[in-house]
Amino acid sequence: MQSIPKKITPCPILQAVVELRFETVLPSDAVFGILYSLLSSQYNTFEKLPILQIPEILRSQDPNLRYQPAYKLIDDNFWVQIGSNVISVVNVGSYAGWTLFLEKISSVLNHLNDSKIVSKVTRFGIRYISFFSLDIFKEINFGLTLSGDEFETEQLVLRSLLKREEFFVNLQVANKTFVSDFTEIGSIIDIDTFIENENLTIPDIKSSFLERSHFEQKKLFFGILKKEFLVSLNPEY
């Protein structure tokens, strides 16, 4: 069985996001108002996001906008982002670790469940974006050939949809790239592990899918790294 580190140093995680998409009969303003009243004691600063400049009727009809957040609640390195059909918990900046992140996620899910806003959950996902200053393709278990020779390129972006247990995984690996709000050029490993199921419930997500999706993304992340590269990251087991 693959041995998975608890942490590596320095931590490469730029952002960690847990997102839940849902259906509701309430208008977007009502969704935000109810959730803000439940969360404002902890997240007492909020921002309106630029998508609010687009009329709600257009946002609701455009599949690219329907699940975009319209408000951001802020508590230090944690955000809660809320839209008419989506809520996400985001750890930005220094990664707080899974234990604290899980506490934040569970608290938000409890409030969401208590609010009775959600008529149906449509998608649940957990996403980690990690940054490396080196060329990550030299340090992962992946290779390409062209006409029998090693494939050499100035820049490479790998995107793939994988199946892991009951989850799907959007995997993106890229080198020589910029990350938003980050000035250094380097490589990213972006893993979005998600499940789409009309029978999903918030209690099911809390009791089962949350921990399992986190485990699957960690297993994939550490599984694609070469052993000698992982050793250089000071893994703690």
Image: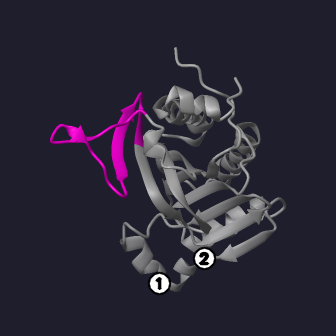
Three-letter code, disc 2: Leu
Cα–Cα gap, marks 1 and 2: 13 Å
In the rendered image, which quarter contains the C terminus? Answer: top right
Instruction: Give the image quarter of residue 7.
Output: top right
What is the span of residues highlighted in magenta in the rendered image? 141-169
Residue 92 vs residue 85: left or right?
A: right
Question: Which residue is situated farthest in the right direction here?
Answer: 41
Provide residue 204's location: percent of width, then percent of height: 56, 34
Q: Is residue 155 magenta?
A: yes
Q: Residues within 10 Å of mark 1 (few under 14, many from 20)?
A: few
Asked whether the residues under the numbered discs 1 and 2 touch, taking CB atoms below 8 Å apart as contact, a structural biologist would say no
The magenta stretch spans residue 215: no
Image coordinates for residue 38, horizontal then vertical, percent: 76, 59
Residue 221 sits above or below residue 38 on the image: above
**Three-letter amino acid code at the position of disc 1:** Pro
Q: Is residue 233 above or below residue 185?
A: above
Residue 77 or residue 222, whichever sits in front: 222
Q: Nearer the viewer, mark 1 or mark 2?
A: 2
In screen coordinates, is 208 left or right of 159? right
Q: Which residue is mark 2?
A: 49
- Residue nearest the viewer, comparing 197 with 164: 164
The residue that appears at 53% across and 40% down in the rendered structure is: 201
Q: Which mark is residue 55?
A: 1
